[in-house]
């Protein structure tokens, strides 16, 4: 069966520091991968999605970037964090021809 | 911008009662999906209804879709304390492709024992 992992689970970082969040999927190949951010008490906002290795689409202008160095690995990065980058970051995957997205456990980021 | 808008924002009912949540959206869709999120956790997929479907059931869940009104409802029957969570609708717009989901703000459901 397929599983999706995210780490770390929580992270506290100072303003101006770099960021790297990792997401990996097991049990499938060539998935579509997604990064979402959820502000406290709000819905999810799509940040990036990828349909293949090295293919990244950005949905909103921001301080973050994404990379897909391997088929089942999706990384969210920043060179310098802002206070406004705080939030709950969720990774999701779906089969290429499928309709349902499956979410990871999320990473809670607090920028101080 | 968020396309889906859930209503109510918060709902508190007694265990055993039915809970109904509504979702409205603005543009044409391929499908509409409902997710549940327990506090501080990831999202769990509940049910997907396609644009050519009007009603779908899964266990105690019943989802309806009215594309003429651009609205959907999620009914949870015989609620249990474990149903306490936030519920989100998400719409997928055509073309199907990468299927970028647009989420609403969610309904926070509390089931009182």
Image (tube, grey):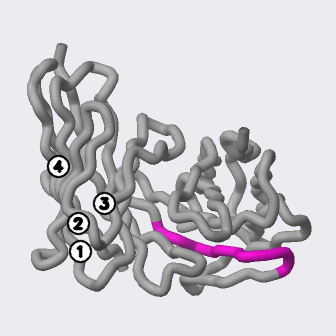
Kindly identify which residue carries mark 1.
Answer: B25
Q: Nearer the viewer, residue A98 or A107?
A: A98
Q: CA distance from mark 2 to mark 1?
A: 6 Å
* Disc 2 + disc 3, Cβ < 8 Å: yes
Q: Give the main secondary structure of the magenta stretch.
A: strand
Q: Residue at x 11, y 75 (%)?
A: B69
User: Residue A112 location, x and y as percent?
Assistant: 62, 54
**Disc 3 vs disc 1: which is toward the camera?**
1
- At mark 3, the secondary structure is loop
User: On the rendered structure, is B94 left or right of A31?
Assistant: left
Q: Position of residue A12 (x, y in %)?
A: 68, 47
Q: Residue B23 in the image: state x and y as whole percent.
A: 20, 62
- Please give the residue where the numbered disc 3 appears in the rendered image: B105
Given the image, what chain letter belongs to the residue carrying mark 3?
B
Q: CA distance from mark 3 to mark 1?
A: 12 Å
**Magenta-colored span:** A45-54
Magenta-drawn stretch contains B58: no
Q: CA distance from mark 2 to mark 3?
A: 6 Å
Residue B111 image offset from top left, x and y in percent: 20, 25
Dot 2 or dot 3: first in sequence order is: 2
Report the front residue among A53 and B10. Answer: A53
Mark 4 = which residue?
B21
The 10 Å Cα crowd at callout 4, few under 14, some 14 to 19, many 20 or more, is: many
Is residue A52 highlighted in magenta?
yes
Viewer-closest of B105 and A19? B105
- Left or right: where does residue A40 sit relative to residue A88? left
Q: CA distance from mark 2 to mark 4?
A: 11 Å
Tag on residue B5?
Answer: 2
């Amino acid at each position: 069966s397929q599983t999706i992992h995210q780490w770390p689970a929580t992270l506290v970082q100072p303003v101006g520091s770099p960021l790297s969040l990792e997401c990996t999927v097991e049990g499938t190949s060539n998935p579509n991968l997604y990064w979402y951010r959820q502000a406290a008490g709000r819905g999810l906002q799509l940040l990036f999605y990828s349909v293949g290795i090295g293919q990244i689409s950005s949905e909103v202008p921001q301080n973050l970037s994404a990379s897909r160095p391997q088929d089942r690995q999706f990384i969210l990065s920043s060179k310098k964090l802002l206070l406004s980058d705080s939030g709950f970051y969720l990774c999701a995957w779906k089969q290429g021809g499928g309709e349902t997205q499956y979410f990871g456990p999320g990473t809670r980021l607090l920028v101080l | 911008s968020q396309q889906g808008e859930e209503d109510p924002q918060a709902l508190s009912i007694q265990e055993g009662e039915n809970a109904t949540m509504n979702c409205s959206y603005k543009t044409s869709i391929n499908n509409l999906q409902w997710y549940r999120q327990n506090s501080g956790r990831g999202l769990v997929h509940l049910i997907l209804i396609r644009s050519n479907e009007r009603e779908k059931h899964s266990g105690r869940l019943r989802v309806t879709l009215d594309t003429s009104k651009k609205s959907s409802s999620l009914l949870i029957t015989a609620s249990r304390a474990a149903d306490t969570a936030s519920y989100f609708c998400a719409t997928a717009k055509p073309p199907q492709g990468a299927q970028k989901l647009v989420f609403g703000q969610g309904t926070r459901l509390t089931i009182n024992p």
